[in-house]
Image (cartoon, rainbow, N blue to C red):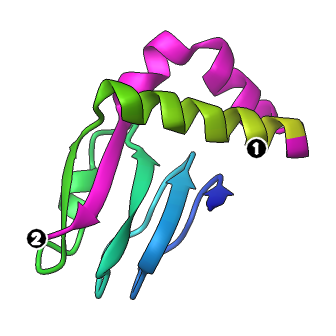
Amino acid sequence: VAVVEGVGHHCCEYMTGGLVIVLGKVGYNVGAGMTAGIAYILDEDQTLERKINTSYVKVRALKEEEEKELKYWIEEHFRATQSPWAKEILENWEKFKSLFKLVEPLE
């Protein structure tokens, strides 16, 4: 499990398992070569679908149980780092939870 607050280009490139949570912006080519695992990515500006590598991954909204898992890991990230950004997200969870998208490999 990795919780990060932003990434450049090629996020989750060649990912073969695990969980990545991105609390900030991503560059282009998200998920190139991704064969397993999932990523929860904050999509505040609604541009994620234009940035994914559609040859390998798809984007969808989170299910309720996934929202719970995501919140748990953000809480853990906050406990470990005292991140002001994680705190902002948690304090405004009702606003932010719908801005996260799940990225997963194509079937």
Residue 87 painted magenta: yes
Q: Which residue is mark 2?
A: 107
The numbered mark at residue 77 is 1
- Type of amino acid at the residue the image marks with label 2: Glu
Q: Is residue 12 above or below residue 4?
A: below
- Say whether residue 79 is left or right of residue 45: right
Residue 12 makes an appearance in the image: no
Whole-percent x, y for residue 92 in the image: 59, 13
- What x and y, as percent, mark residue 31? 32, 74
Locate residue 63: give its quadrant.
top left
Q: Earlier in the sequence, mark 2 or mark 1?
A: 1
Identified by mark 1, the residue type is His
Q: Position of residue 38 (x, y in %)?
A: 38, 61
Relative placement, left or right, of 8 versus 81 is left
Whether residue 88 is visible here, answered yes or no, is yes
* Magenta stretch: dominant secondary structure: helix
Q: What span is in magenta?
A: 80-107
Distance of label 2 from label 1 (alpha carbons): 30 Å
| Dots 2, 1 in contact, CB < 8 A | no
Q: Nearer the viewer, residue 5 or 106?
A: 106
Q: Is residue 97 left or right of residue 76?
A: left
Image point (33%, 75%), residue name:
36
Quick one: quadrant of the N terminus? bottom right
> How crowded is the residue under tag 1: few (<14 C-alpha within 10 Å), some, or many (20+)?
some
Q: Give the answer, above or below, for where 27 lies relative to 86.
A: below
Q: Identify which residue is drawn at 42% across, 68% down.
A: 27
Quarter of the image with the C terminus in it: bottom left
